[in-house]
Image (spheres, rainbow, N blue to C red):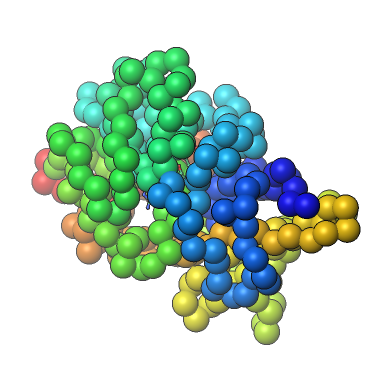
């Protein structure tokens, strides 16, 4: 039997991406996960379909905690200033809703109707406009002082071209002087011994979770093996890991330049040992 949920999730954003809580046949990988291998999207909502959306807030509870949300919203509100904000991958509104409550006009783009439906059902949702689409290419009207992409969601774009397109799309939505903010983990390759492609990140006795890296292509996947009542199942989701310096080049391609890089939303300095970063690029011309 397939477990009703994946339990070995990393709550911190220091993961390749937010790990959806999994149940459901259409999201299951039949067979063994291989490097660079992941399930194809099996419905229009991508990897965040109905069953994941239904459990997303509970399964990401640590990321919804005030101590996780407030510093992000404080910084984003400051960067937005008197302008409007656009969130790529708005999801269920974890950041967009409290940012809108701060008086910042917020628009969100997301592939998943299931996730956006959850946002739309929450108090205060009227203050957040939403558009269903791919944030690498979808354009919405208006210019903005801030575009942001949090919780490792840049890794959900699994090609370099798509990640570059995302930067270009962010720049296209920004007014001169506007900022693009990305929160994402630093790839954990320092933990990967020579000759190995697998990094475990959790085990519970009934479930084993591990990442698989392909350093030739920067493809990776997060994989969950669960044994329940003597039967095993595997679930896998693909990502593309990306370096801070590579993001800076993507920003340059899109006509932006790095203005800040911190380790976290509290502006802790980014160092040699930082495992994640919050980076800010500016569109010049103000
Ligand atoms: C990890 S969730 C983050 C949601 C929200 N930003 C948060 O912090 O809780 C990632 C979201 O990005 C969306 N997403 C992933 N790839 C996307 C793409 N290419 N275009 C639009 N949305 C995408 C997913 O549907 C999901 O809602």
Ligand 1 - quadrant of the structure image: top left
Tell me if residue 6 comes above or below residue 121 in the rendering.
below
Q: Quadrant of the C terminus?
A: top left
Task: Answer whether residue 211 is visible to the viewer in this image.
Answer: no
Image x and y of residue 261, in percent:
41, 49
Would you identify the image quadrant in which residue 157 lies?
bottom left
Indicate left or right for 56 with 80 as reference.
right
Tell me what residue is drawn at x 44 percent, y 15 percent.
123
Depth check: give the residue in front, 91 or 231.
231
Image x and y of residue 262, in percent:
46, 46
Which residue ends up furthest to the left in the rendered image?
Answer: 285
Depth check: give the residue in front, 258 or 237.
237
Q: How many marks?
A: 0
Tell me what residue is drawn at x 15 percent, y 40 percent.
175
Depth check: give the residue in front, 68 or 55.
55
Tell me what residue is drawn at x 62 percent, y 75 percent.
34
Image x and y of residue 129, in percent:
29, 27
Depth check: give the residue in front, 13 or 74.
13
């Amino acid at each position: 039997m397939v477990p009703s949920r994946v339990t070995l999730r990393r709550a911190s954003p220091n993961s390749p991406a937010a790990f959806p809580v999994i149940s459901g046949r259409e999201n299951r990988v039949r067979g063994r996960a291989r490097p660079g291998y992941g399930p194809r999207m099996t419905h229009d909502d991508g990897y965040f379909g109905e069953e994941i959306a239904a459990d997303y807030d509970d399964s990401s509870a640590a990321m919804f905690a005030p101590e996780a949300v407030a510093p992000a919203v404080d910084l984003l509100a400051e960067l937005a200033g008197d302008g409007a904000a656009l969130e790529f991958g708005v999801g269920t509104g974890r950041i967009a809703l409290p940012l809108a409550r701060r008086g910042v006009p917020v628009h969100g783009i997301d592939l998943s109707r299931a996730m956006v439906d959850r946002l739309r059902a929450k108090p205060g949702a009227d203050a957040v406009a939403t558009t269903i689409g791919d944030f690498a290419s979808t354009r919405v009207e208006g210019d903005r002082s801030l575009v942001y992409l949090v919780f490792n969601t840049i890794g959900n774009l699994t090609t370099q071209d798509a990640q570059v397109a995302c930067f270009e799309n962010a720049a296209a939505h920004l007014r001169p002087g506007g900022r693009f903010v990305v929160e994402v983990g630093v790839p954990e390759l320092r933990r990967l011994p020579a000759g190995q492609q697998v990094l475990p990140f959790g085990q519970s006795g009934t479930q084993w979770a591990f990442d698989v890296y392909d350093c030739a292509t920067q493809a990776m996947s997060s994989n969950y093996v669960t044994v329940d009542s003597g039967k095993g199942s595997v679930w896998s989701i693909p990502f593309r890991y990306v370096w801070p310096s590579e993001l800076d080049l993507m920003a340059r391609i899109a006509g932006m330049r790095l203005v800040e890089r911190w380790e976290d939303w509290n502006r802790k300095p980014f160092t040699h040992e930082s495992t994640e970063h919050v980076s800010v690029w500016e569109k010049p011309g103000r």
